[in-house]
Amino acid sequence: MLNAAAMIAKPTPRVLVACLAVVIALPFIPVSDAEVFHHTSMKLARDVLPPLFEGEEVPSAVVWSWSGDEKVGEAIRSAFERRNLSELVEQGAPVLRVELEDEGLDVNLRASLGQKKEWKKARKGSLLSLVPPLMAVLLALLFKNIIASLFLGVWAGVTVLQGGNPLLGLWLTFSEYTWGVLSDTFNLEILGFTFGLVGMVGIIGRMGGTQGLVNAISRFAKGPRSAQGVTGLMGTLIFFDDYANTLVVGTTARAFTDKMRVSREKLAYIVDSTSAPVAGVAIISTWIGYEVGLFDSLLVEFAHIPGVPSSGYELFFEILPLRFYCFFALCLVFLTALTGRDLGPMFHAERRVRRGGPVVPPPGIGDAKRPADPGLGTLSKEGVPPRLLNAVLPIASVLSFIGYRVVDAGSGALVDKFNFFSLDHWRILFSAGADDIGSILFMSALLGGGVAMALALGQRLLTPGEVVGAYGKGVTTLVEAATILILAWVIKNVCDDLGTGLALVGIVGTSVPALLLPLLIFVLAGLVAFSTGTSWGTMALLLPVAAPLATLISGELPIILACMGAVLDGAIWGDHCSPISDTTVLSSTATGCPHLSHVKTQMPYAMLAMGMAAGVGYLGFASGLSCGVIYPVGILGMLGVLLVVGKDPN
């Protein structure tokens, strides 16, 4: 690792002025305390009340006893009844006692039903809740040091949680938050999958498999533009999980795109923009189980709305045409490849490579000073034959194992005999199997590494020592990237405890016209995801807020569906733009692209797709435009921007 002084870059005047403007404007941002209190209380009620009704003896009716803010109490009781957990009766039923306390910084909610008791506390979001993500992003932009920026953002957030005590904040940063992330099984499995897959790719490259894959794909691509199209197609075809998509495509395509003179920044953009968008809209993926589960819990909010689907899966299909950002982001990948034109910093990255420069940004460009190529040692050993099979078999074993294990893990959830042609059966399998996705991914990486080792040794292409060396070289290049990923998880947890997402909800408020509601929810979801670095967390936070909001303000089914789609798409857009997002970090890691270089070069494309999704998509749909008009106009709009504003790096 380089010393701290060598890792600090001098900020440019434009970046410095922009950061100062944000800092000066922050104290003047209005946050509605009433809105924050209301939504924090509702969030606590969703966590605390349902467990009281779990178990063998579930009362069919209760008497409601409320202590606290009456307005919030009525809202919680109304939502509680809509979820069919209770019906109020005057006598002959157990008493459900709920007590809500506003303690200034915190909100407490206590509930009891018979002998069962539940209690939870949450911090109310405020301007201070925005400190961790803002500090991390601004410092990263100023000094190009993502690790130090993330750490200082975490430390500042924990210090705020501890009442301004920096020493206690520093101690808890390590002892509670960092240790909590490192001791989480799922996080360790994702890290293991990342390291294992990269080690596997190192062996594949050393024994000539990567060169064989490059030679085979080269038949379909003769230059940078077609190489981008082929890579985008690979990213679209691996639709069942975004982590698997990012790491498999990123690690296997880089030797091919390097040969075709495509910059690592462009590769990282293609990988990032075809992972979450395609997994989010695929009718069979690990995402759909999560999204359908969220929709199922919201159906009671729409029970009085005519035409609302009866299941979360049906609701998913109703919303699918309204996932404007996902579809526009995918289209933009192929439009960029087709036109050969690039926007902003990506143009300079591509021109660097076309003029014979390195595919990876040299020291001083992007983030911290580092070697010109943090690659995985994928150069073939001298004398080994370039065999396609030596790349295909390990990769196929990873993908096949993931698919098989997800289906196998979810098969217990099927009541009827599995029907291969039933989308509902596939949905059930992937929904249930997604619970074990961390261990499945980790085991698949170990299997893929084992297959690669067996091929290298069985064909006597590498000695045992060379196999270990190739595997280890790939793993050791990820130390810095793994540190960034861990800190991204840590700052997400700090933001959750600070109520960052609900603070942003308080900034937007609820006094908006129905016509603008889908657009504002889309932007709000993007801001929450950008600030917290998590798309799934943003969905879980905002869907229960957006559902009653859309019902209250509009009550019309098209607007409600658009608002639900806006939450899902806004979460993915914000995740794409966020330097503290785990999928953004993984895209940088898998492609060997400096992290901030990836964030900086991807931003114009994410903003272009976002602009079309917001203006033509959500605002247009709320104004009465059909999807048959929205998609052609949006695609032509993006094409026009590329042709007019974009430049040809050749």
Image (cartoon, helix red, strand yellow):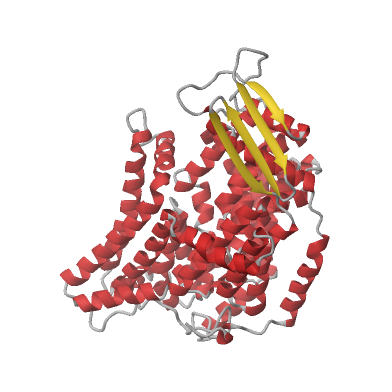
Q: Can residue 121 be seen in the rendering of this structure?
A: yes
At x 51%, y 35%, the residue is 313
Task: Determine the image quadrant of residue 138.
Answer: bottom right
The residue nearer to you, when weighing 631 against 434, is 434
- The C terminus appears in which quarter of the rendering? bottom right
Residue 246 in the image, given as x and y percentages of width and height: 45, 61
Q: Can residue 329 be seen in the rendering of this structure?
A: no
* Vertical relation: 550 (above or below) 236: above
Residue 358 in the image, given as x and y percentages of width and height: 49, 84
The residue nearer to you, when weighing 80 against 333, is 80
Left or right of 350: which side holds 645? right
Residue 523 in the image, given as x and y percentages of width and height: 70, 53
Residue 256 in the image, given as x and y percentages of width and height: 40, 72
Residue farthest to the top, as pictured: 92
At x 67%, y 23%, the residue is 64
At x 81%, y 69%, the residue is 24
